[in-house]
Structure formats: structure tokens, C-alpha cells
Amino acid sequence: MKQYFKENRMLRYLLTILFPVVLLTLLFFMLMSSNMVRQATAGMERQSADNADKVNAYMLEVAGDMEDIRELIEMNCSTDDEVVTFVRSTEHYGVFGGVYTGDNTGFYVGSTPWDIPDDYDPTSRPWYIDGKDSRDWVFGEPYLDASVGLMCVSVSARMDAGDDSIVRVVAADIYLDYMDSLAQDIVAGSDLEGALLVTEDGVIIADSTGSDAGTNMAESIEFNQRLDQDLADVGSGLYTVRTMGGTYYVSVEEVESTGWYLLIYENRSIILHDLYVTITIMLMAALFVTLFLTWVMIRYGNEVSEVEQQANKAKTEFISRISHDIRTPIGQVLNLTAFAKADKNDPGKLDEDLDRIDSSGRFLLSLINDVLDVSQIESGLMEMHPAPVSYQSYIADTRNILVPLCESKGLKCEIIEAEDKDTLPALYCDEVRLKQITLNLISNAVKYTPAGGTITYRSESHAKEDGSLAFAFTLSDTGVGMTKEFMEHMFDKFTRDTKNELRDSTQMGSGLGLYLVKNMVTLMGGTIEYQSEQGKGTSVSVRIDMEKAPAAPETQAEDRAADSKAQPDHHYSGYVLLVEDNEINTEIACRMFEELGLTVDHAADGEEAVSKFSESAEGYYRVIFMDIQMPKMNGYDATRAIRGLSRRDAATVPVIAMTADAFKDAMDASAEAGMTGFITKPLIISQICGILDEYM
């Protein structure tokens, strides 16, 4: 074992990069979980607003029916006998428990049979008092009709009796069983715990459980004093509420026409469960990997040769610097998670804490991506894959990067294209790496230029006599500039301009960006030059003599310009097969696919995937998303087995590799196994949409 470790350089290399690779996977869990609370509560608020509008529309429709009845009485009934005849003919209005009218002379008639007491006085009844002074329809206080077991509410309004001395009111009792059905529909098929329609003082009109109508919600639901008061004093919004049964998020929305309130509530522990589980797993896994790597280095570090000791020293320094930079955002994530727990009853602060967790996580993801690129460069594994790219496409991409960044920070920007831009030959380069160089330089310029400054991109590209392109540009800013000391070693790893007092010390940076830019420009056969003066700004020039492109692309610029103007919402249909052995990875991927409209079948390993596919009807699965490292049968072998089945769709069904291994060897192995495409973890929704757009 010792000798094998000493002689196997690749094994030592893999162990060195294992830590950032594992963190990259774990980071994805954290980023997805931090959005769960926000998405869930935002969905609750949308549901409460939409369904409050449904209640409002229903009650306005009822008022419209009553308006028809009032107009018919006013137009066709001039005597009490005619009123009696008409009112008793209104039974076809099924929503009403009964229509009735009365006036200040003691006259009363209803559409349903009822023995009227001799001392019955319409003018003393709530429906008459509520409606006698209003031509607009007034809804009374809801009550439980014990005879039918339904909640009811009266609606009344004044009508023209033909005699100014007579004040007549027409009214109806409305059954509210529709509201119970609506409350049950809100909860059905969701994680919501319940829905209530209540009056201003908390009397329950409708309940998704169907058991508490007519009671006060403070007695039935045990809401704390924040919602035990009149809801008019609370208002619409999202609240955190404690009850004897736990803590809830409650979304409150007013029904405009009645003054009632629709409440949708969900147990907070359900929403936060995945977040707590994810963070716990991340910390345990990171601790395990750190201890394991430490043990490996201590155990075998003293037995390597002098040359290898020097290499190990460089690796140790590298890990030390990376460890320092990784601890900063991880410490922020841990502290902000504690703050989020403390702020659980303050949605505003909780939202702010989650935003900061998201920002720290994204910085950590960027840092790990840079580390992987550094590893490729230092090991000689970074390769360039040149392909023709039109000059117009490159400029369109640069504009799409620069303009939004400048606008978000309040900077002026200017893009000066080459004089002969319409006749320039195509670029012949690795487009991904050229974009990475351009984005890195633009990001630095924007980051270190205060609001009100100017960023200028000047294209200096020109055609050479042999038909190839001398690619060049200069990016200038009016920012804080760089110190002379920093410029002497600006392309070294982990170098920051810490002595520049004009720079914002709170801005995050890994110190790897310029190192990567310099090396990628060199791999392309180009040069990079800087000019800078502290307090006045910086100018960077990149020049790359490119080979003549074998064929110039024709429609890239038009396609990308169209893409930049319109990004339609993606929605798909059909079945996909997800092959993934990790439970949390599976949950995250399923949620992504289902939000895009797809139905997901899951297989926990390669053997199960082959079985599910072979037992399905031809064409049943539109795409297969295949993890690589799995028990029983890995993704490569599972793909070969599927391709070998004797059915027509076995050779054509798209099989997409999913892996955290972003190196070329993994891509080549997936293609050799018969996989159609390749995406790296963590999964990003835009990557998934790109795959689905291509293969569905």
C-alpha cells in the first residue's frame, strides 16, 4: 500500500482535488435548500391572493343575482300582493336559502314557507337595519343554520317602494357551502396544513377540515394573540404564528367585497426540515473528508522523495490558502444559518439571512470552479478545443455580459467595435475559454469601478493577409486602479491588492482570476498587458493571433441576439427516467423536472434502470438522466446494457450523463459508453432546459 501510494502520482493527485470536488457537490444541496423557505412562502401568498379573488368574484356574482331580483320587483310590482307573488316565485335561485322583503309598515313576505309571529317586526331585524340606507348590497354577519348544517350570510339593500314614506328592503340568505369546497381544494394535493375563510373578528366561515365552521378560530386553531385580534388590525400579509401544535407560516388575504379574510397556513418544520438535514449532511461530510485527507498526508508524507516533498509542500500551501478562503464563506453560512433560526418569527430578517447564505454559497461555488481550473492547468490537463466563432457572435456575447453588469452598478459602458467589423474573418478558438477570459476581466473592471464610472471595451481585431484573424481588444475603466507592488506579481496564485486603500476590503475575491486568465491566454498563444494607476483606473489589452477558421458560422450572431431578447418560459411534457442513488440528489432533480412539467420515474441504480427501461413501452421515456457512480451497476454499464436491448428505441433514446467529474476523461468515457450528452453537478435548471430543448 505504501509503495503503491509513493509510485502512483495520479492517486496522489486525485486525493489532492478530492476535497474541493466533494465540497462542490455539497454546495449544490445548500444552494437549493436555502431557497425552499422563500419559494414555499411565496407560493402560499400567491395561492391566498388567487383564491381570495375567487371568493370575491363569487360574492359579487351573488350580489348581481340580487340586483336582478330588485330590478324585477321595482319594475313589475306596484302593490304588496304583486310583491308577495313575485318573491314566492324566486325558488329557482338555487344559491339562496330564501329571498324576502319587508318595510317599515310591518309588511313582510318570504319565498319559503314560514309562520310569521304576530309580533314580527322587520325593522328590528339585522338584515333590514343593514340594508335600509344603502342601494349597494350589504353582507351581514355569517351564521350557522342549524336546520341544514351550513354557514349562511344575509345580503340586503334598499329598494324603491314607490312611496317616499315607505322604506322597503329586499334581502336573501346565501348558503356558503361553496366556500368549504374552495378551502378543501386549496389544501388538496399540496403540503399545506389548512385553509380558513373567517370574518374580521375570527369567526370561521369555511374550513378545509369541514369541522370548525361557526366557531372562532382562536378557540379552534389556537392561533397566538397576534391573530386573535380583529384581522382588520393585522391586515393582509405573511405571518409567523405559534400554536400549541407548533409554529406556522400563515398567509392572510382580505376579500374586498365582504371584509372577510382567507388564511392559508403550513407547518414551518415541514418547510425547514430539508434545509436542516442538508446543512447537517454537508458539515459531517466536510469534516470526514478533511480528517481523511489530513490522515493520508500525515501517514505517507514523510516517506516520499525530496522532489516529491517539494511538490507536497506546494500542494500544502495551495490547500492552506484554499482552506482559508473556503472557511470564510462556510463560516458565514454557519453563522447566518444560526441567525435564520433566531429570525424565524421575522420573515423580513429571515429573507435577508437566506439571501446572504445564497450569496456566500455562490462565491464558494465560483471558488471551487477556479480551483478545478487551476488543477487542470498545473497538471497539464487543460486542453483547448478550437472551433469557428463569428466576430459578430463574440461581440453580441460581450455586450450581453457587460451592459447588465454596468447597469446594475450604475456605471456607464461603451463598446467600440472594429472598423471593418462586417468583413472580419471568423475567430478560431475555444469559445468557452475565450468567454471565461472576457467575463473575468469585465467582472474585475466592474467590481473595482465605483458607481458613476465608465467601462470601455474597444475591439482592435483585424484581418491578416492569409485570411485569419488577429484578435485583440482593450478593456479600460476609471476605477481605483492597482498599486505598483501588486502589479509586479499580479498573475501569481492567490494574489490580492491588499495594500490598495481605495479598494473595498469587503469584496470577495479568490486571487485566482488573473492567474487563470494569464494561463488561458498563453495556452491560446496570446499575450496580456496591463496599464494601471492607483486612483485613476486600469487598462488591459489581450492579443491572440488565431489560425484561419476552416468554415465561418453563418447564423450564430442572429441566433444569440434573438436569444438575448427573448427567454421564454420552458414547459415540457412526458416521462423521463432519473437514475440516481443519492436520496437528496434524487429529491432535488425530481423537483426540477416536475416544475418543468415532466413526470419522473426513478431508478436507484443501473440494474433497476435497465429493468425499468426494458419493461416500458417503446418511446415511453423521452430522456434518461444517468448518474455515473452507483452501486450494483454504474452508469456506463447501464447505458451499454440499454443500447444492447433488442427494441427500436434502445439505440435512439437520449441518455444524459450526470456527474460531478467535470474533466475530459469523464466526458470521453460517457461518449464511448453510448451516452448522448453530458451535464455536470450541481444541476442548474438552464442546463437541463438546454438538454431538453435539444432532445425533446
Image (cartoon, rainbow, N blue to C red):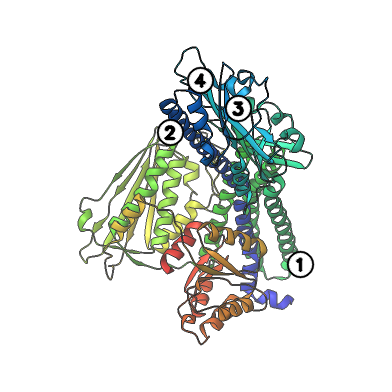
Q: Which residue is mark 1?
A: 299
Separation of residues labelled 1 and 2 (CA atoms): 53 Å
Q: Is residue 541 visible?
A: no
Q: How many marks?
A: 4
Separation of residues labelled 1 and 3 (CA atoms): 81 Å
Image quarter of residue 152: top right
First in residue order: circle 1 vs circle 2: 1
Q: Which residue is mark 3?
A: 140
Position of residue 279 in the picture relative to residue 392 (left or right): right
- The residue mark sitting in front, 1 or 3, is 3
Is 447 in front, or is 598?
598
Position of residue 222 in the picture relative to residue 41 (left or right): right
Is 484 in front, or is 188?
188
Residue at left offset 39%, top offset 58%: 434
Q: Residues within 10 Å of mark 1 (few under 14, many from 20)?
A: few
Separation of residues labelled 2 and 4 (CA atoms): 58 Å
Mark 2 touching mark 4, by CB under 8 A?
no
Mark 1 touching mark 3, by CB under 8 A?
no
Question: Residue 167, percent across and down?
Answer: 52, 17
Element type at mark 1:
helix
Q: Which residue is mark 2?
A: 451
Type of residue at label 1? Arg
